[in-house]
Amino acid sequence: MESTNGHVEATGLEVEMNTEADPAKAQKRPAPGDEADTPSKPKAKRRKKSAAGPALPTNALMQLNELKPGLTWNLTAQDGPVHAPNFTMQVEVNGSVFRGQGKTKKLAKLTCAQTALDSFVQFRNTSPMKTVGGGGDFTSDDTNCKEFDAQNGSAAAEEADELKAPLVPAIETQGKNPVMVLNEMRPGITYDCVGETGESHSKSFTMSVTVGNETFTGSGRNKRLAKSRAAQAALQKMFNLEFSGSPGQEAVVAEDGSSLPQALADKVAQLVQAKFAELTENLASPYARRKVLAGIAMTTSEGGGDDVQIISVTTGTKCINGEYMSASGLSLNDCHAEILAKRCLRRYLYTQLRMHIQADASYDPDNSILEARQEGQGFRVKNHVRFHLYISTSPCGDARIFSPHEVEESGVESDKHPNRKARGQLRTKIESGEGTIPVKREMGGLQTWDGILQGERMLTMSCSDKVTRWNVLGLQGSLLSQFLEPVYLSSIILGSLYHRIHMSRAMFGRVPALPNLPATYLCHRPLLSGTLSPESRQPGKAPNFATVWLCCDEGLEVVTCMSGKTESGQCSRICKQRFFQEFNHVFGQLPAMNPQTEENKPEMYSEAKAMNSTYQIAKSELMKSFEKSGLGNWVNKPMEMDQFGLSTTASVDLSKQL
Ligand SMILES: [Zn+2]
């Protein structure tokens, strides 16, 4: 807060920004959820008025505050006549002093923050980014994002949003097509059609445009849309111009103020789609039929943009039929694309671990993305190695259930959804169906083997819930936790139905505080983003198969969802049995988190799962907190499903190298 000597504590900025607003605004507190979507007229007026100041980024102040907490701001001058004062604010960052002027203290501070930021970070400063945090009662009638925002101090973002002025004010983008705007800026520019995939009913075109030395692409169901998206990509990168328009489409910023560069999100999406096209003969193969496409990409450089490597590509939307449950871990229970993509990553992590076994054929620790922990036990993913999950649509369950497109169309974020009370609830996929239903309280999270065999529906947790779980427990699961620190997703990129509010609630916002989470585990918040070229709905019936590709294996594996096995009846590369074999291969060969000896070598998969008590504690913390906060019980598979030993018939090929 501001004190008499003109000092303003950076820590109180958000509050101060709110109360410093002019009296008219102070009286009319913004209604929750209306920050980005009030009908454009009054908003535009206010913006025009404040745009009298310098062109400002959306939230430089908040970002600076997040990057450098505890800065001291000084009001060093106030001149000009009383009716039109001019303020000068000053801040010291990294030993340098920065100043900014403005017609209000707020504007002066923002200018000052931007100058400071420009000096030490390369900023993506025109996109209206928002921080969305956890907690808050997102099921009450008149809240949603605002409660999240308030907890994380992004009232500042909201305020800054109001002060936003385009960086290229001379260009009027309102109502104009990106192609027209780009043409005004670079007359005579030409577009090429560089890709055409899919059958007649579900075509996708890719257009490219070159501006200067850079080529931008966009895709869509017709050439006009693809062209517009290519132009949009160019305008965004080259001229800092945004066309997003729809509230809810903005990327979600991390706590340190960083966000996923749109170009990286688009690149990951394009590479996953391109790999899938390559694997399916340019989508001509019958296995190209799909509803959901997912993939995990890895970046390894500090900037993490120019070196995207695709680790896995998967499709699928169905689960196993209860009749086919495997008592030896040979069937895949859940063939939803994103779940398969995660299983692929686990197999990839085993191949990486093997590089550290001296006696192993693939021994070469330098080639591995893993490094020994300084503590001397176990491994962790090297610095700068990041994993990005692409899903062609929002994950089933909480992230998708609230029809995000309807919210966008009405342009009102204050949620009047009749089912809003169910927001955040855990949901399950139903056997031989595609939707999800809320978990039933009376089940207490239990399913029985004999019950399912007798015809009870087998329930599998929704993808939204599973991804949320990865954001706390990591993607590695219990077996790999004996060798690895938790592996978290750096970002989640959605190819369609991306909605900031629903996604951030589903992915981490609904996770209650977990004060007893063991060290190394955390409530991780991946960056969330849509893509510039969202794909259109995949028409037609969902196929009964799923496809699996992993960078360390050859070819596309086709799995029959109903049986959870390959079309020829073999077990998949990524089934539990294979993972148990991988686990046994590395067991006792590497410095693990817990001692591993011949004596404590687990005979059963369930024993291997139970071995890492830290993982089990973290898991039970999460499950208990879901239950306590009224989101429901996590439904587990019958325990008999994990009571199997090593199979002698289905053996994993450990000779495969990267
Ligand atoms: Zn799903």
Image (cartoon, rainbow, N blue to C red):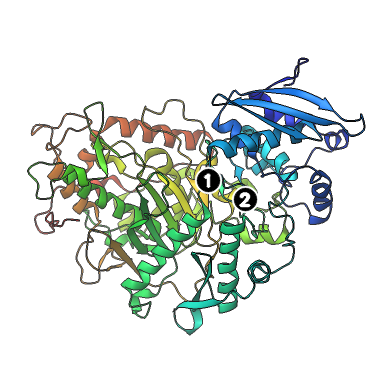
Q: Which residue is mark 2?
A: 127
The answer to whether residue 493 of the structure is visible from this angle is yes
Position in image of residue 60 (x %, y %): 64, 39
Question: Which sits in the foreground, 543 or 485?
Answer: 485
Which residue is nearer to you in this view: 116 or 154?
116
* Residue appearing at x 31%, y 43% in the figure: 477
Mark 1, residue position = 259
Looking at the image, is mark 1 or mark 2 earlier in the sequence? 2
| Local crowd size for mark 2, using a 10 Å CA cut-off: few (<14), some (14–19), many (≥20) | many
Q: If the image is split into quadrants, where does the C terminus sit?
A: bottom left
Helix, strand or loop at label 2? It is: loop
Q: On the picture, is 645 further left or further right than 265?
A: left
Q: With respect to residue 234, does 25 lie above or below?
A: above
Quadrant of the rendered image containing residue 227? bottom right
Could you tell me how many numbered marks the image carries? 2
Task: Give, as a three-letter code, the residue at label 2.
Answer: Ser
Q: Image height check: is 23 above or below 538?
A: above
